[in-house]
Amino acid sequence: MEKMPFRDSEVVRDVQSVIATASPRTTATSDWRQGLPILSGSMVTLRELRLSDAPSLLSMLSTEEVARFISPPPTTVEGFERFIAWTHRERAAGNYVCFAVVPHGMDTAVGIFQVRQLEPGFSTAEWGFAIGSSFWGTGVFVDGAKLVVSFAFNVVGTHRLEARAAVANGRGNGALRKIGATQEGVLRKSFLRNGEYLDQTLWTILDDDWQRAKSVWGSQVH
Ligand SMILES: CC(C)(COP(=O)(O)OP(=O)(O)OC[C@H]1O[C@@H](n2cnc3c(N)ncnc32)[C@H](O)[C@@H]1OP(=O)(O)O)[C@@H](O)C(=O)NCCC(=O)NCCS
């Protein structure tokens, strides 16, 4: 998450070059660029962000404990609205997806899962996540993570999914270990936060790893 964007503007890359270099698997399932599917788990629904999620995301993600180890989130409702509009543009351009995390029985987002391509066609991609602290330790993370990781491997065409977590981020690293990611190494002083360069752990999941995990978790993983 650390390097994942909380941006409200971005140079949109050339869509044609993305499509031209995409693998056949990706090209065949490119309709997520028109709009994200709704993914349903046992505790949460993942769906496209809506502008009306901005107030909820502000209260959930702008707290000190959530923002401590991630790129600074917007600090106003308008800032979150700009971020949400940016996520829609980047999805349409085929560069990035951002899912809202909506617990069953609620209407608004309590967190986000992001996936961005690290090379055209998403073959190697990076994911990140942030959830309001009132939902930590509830199972919401694992439920949503299974949905978004399966989406990356089965729909987007990713074969290697990376995540970076500040070494000091106990919950972030614990969550990645729990979901079955492999720790590949430490990226020294790779993340600037509050004027200090922090070391990050590089975690990866390969599509083969995920198929094995799926057989353990059974039908819960789609
Ligand atoms: C990362 C995040 C989405 C995970 O959600 P969560 O509900 O806290 O995750 P879980 O509780 O399911 O899993 C975290 C695990 O880390 C463990 N953990 C907590 N503190 C820890 C620490 N200091 N050291 C090691 N493990 C720790 C927990 O015990 C838990 O494992 P368990 O369920 O086996 O006990 C959430 O904490 C969050 O939004 N954090 C702020 C944003 C952020 O840091 N994003 C991640 C960037 S990589």
Image (spheres, rainbow, N blue to C red):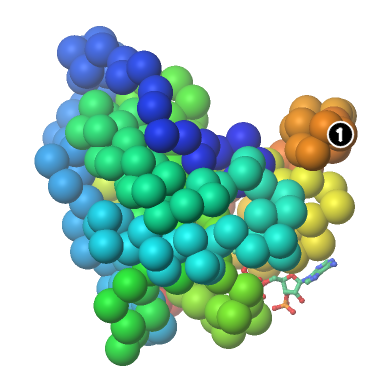
Ligand 1, image quadrant it occupies: bottom right
- Quadrant showing the N terminus: top right
Residue 29 image position (x, y, % from top left)? 17, 40
Q: Quadrant of residue 39?
A: bottom left
Residue drawn at 55 percent across, 38 percent down = 4
Q: Quadrant of residue 95?
A: top left
Residue drawn at 31 percent across, 19 percent down = 12
Residue 210 image position (x, y, % from top left)? 50, 55
Residue 173 image position (x, y, % from top left)? 74, 57
Which of the two residues, 55 or 220, is positioned nearer the viewer here? 55
| Residue 163 drawn above or below residue 63 | above
| Residue 107 drawn above or below residue 169 | below
Residue drawn at 44 percent across, 21 percent down = 119
Q: Secondary structure at mark 1?
A: strand
Residue type, numbered disc 1:
Glu
Looking at the image, residue 201 sits to the left or right of residue 55; the answer is: right
Write down the residue under mark 1. 196
Farthest residue in the bottom direction?
105
Which of the two residues, 186 or 196, is positioned nearer the viewer here? 196
- Quadrant showing the C terminus: bottom left
Does label 1 point to a residue whose CB lies under 8 Å from ligand 1? no
